[in-house]
């Protein structure tokens, strides 16, 4: 069975993805804020701001696939609202890409449509609408 590492299981998407895929993959879930338990998954806590975290976890777990649910994956509908993303979040996401490349893993970096362009069901497929919110500007 292939191993899937989901970084950010304390995001709505990360938690649901890990839970849904637990019967298809060996899922290792990393939470950013504190302990999270998901049936069928091994879980641990990971510092979201650490530039060494990606290399450490990928080297230790050796997954075939990584799903990174970082700052952009935070839902704008969370209550309370998530803090504004830091520009460093882009650099940290890059450390996951480098670790995936180094260890030969597939990588998916998840972002919320809501932050960048809004749900596509409300825009033309070739539309050029952009969200003007502070989080969107920081992440763009």
Image (cartoon, helix red, strand yellow):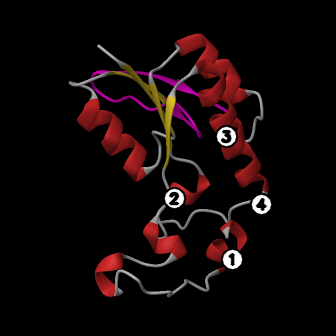
* Magenta region: 30-47
Say if residue 62 shows up in the picture.
yes
Classify residue 36 by image quadrant. top left
Identified at 50% across, 58% down, the residue is 111
| Cα distance in 3D space between marks 1 and 3 | 21 Å
Q: Main secondary structure of the magenta part?
A: loop
Number of other residues with Cα within 10 Å of mark 1, as a class: few under 14, some 14 to 19, many 20 or more: few
User: Which residue has dot 2 on it?
Assistant: 74
Dot 2 falls on a residue whose secondary structure is loop
Number of other residues with Cα within 10 Å of mark 2, as a class: few under 14, some 14 to 19, many 20 or more: many
| Cα distance in 3D space between marks 4 and 2 | 15 Å
User: Which residue has dot 3 on it?
Assistant: 48
Q: Earlier in the sequence, mark 2 or mark 1?
A: 2
Dot 1 falls on a residue whose secondary structure is helix
Q: Earlier in the sequence, mark 1 or mark 3?
A: 3
137 in relation to 132, above or below: above
Q: Earlier in the sequence, mark 2 or mark 3?
A: 3
Which mark is in front, 4 or 2? 4
């Amino acid at each position: 069975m292939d191993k899937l590492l989901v970084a950010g299981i304390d995001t709505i998407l990360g938690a649901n993805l890990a839970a849904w895929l637990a019967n298809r993959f060996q899922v290792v879930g990393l939470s950013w804020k504190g302990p999270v338990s998901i049936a069928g998954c091994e879980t641990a806590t990971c510092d979201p701001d650490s530039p060494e975290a990606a290399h450490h976890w990928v080297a230790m777990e050796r997954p075939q696939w990584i799903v990174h649910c970082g700052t952009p994956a935070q839902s704008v509908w969370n209550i309370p609202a998530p803090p504004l993303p830091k520009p460093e979040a882009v650099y940290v996401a890059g450390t996951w890409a480098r670790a995936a490349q180094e260890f030969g893993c597939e990588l998916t970096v998840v972002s919320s449509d809501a932050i960048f362009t809004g749900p596509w069901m409300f825009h033309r497929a070739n539309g050029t609408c952009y969200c003007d919110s502070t989080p969107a500007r920081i992440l763009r």
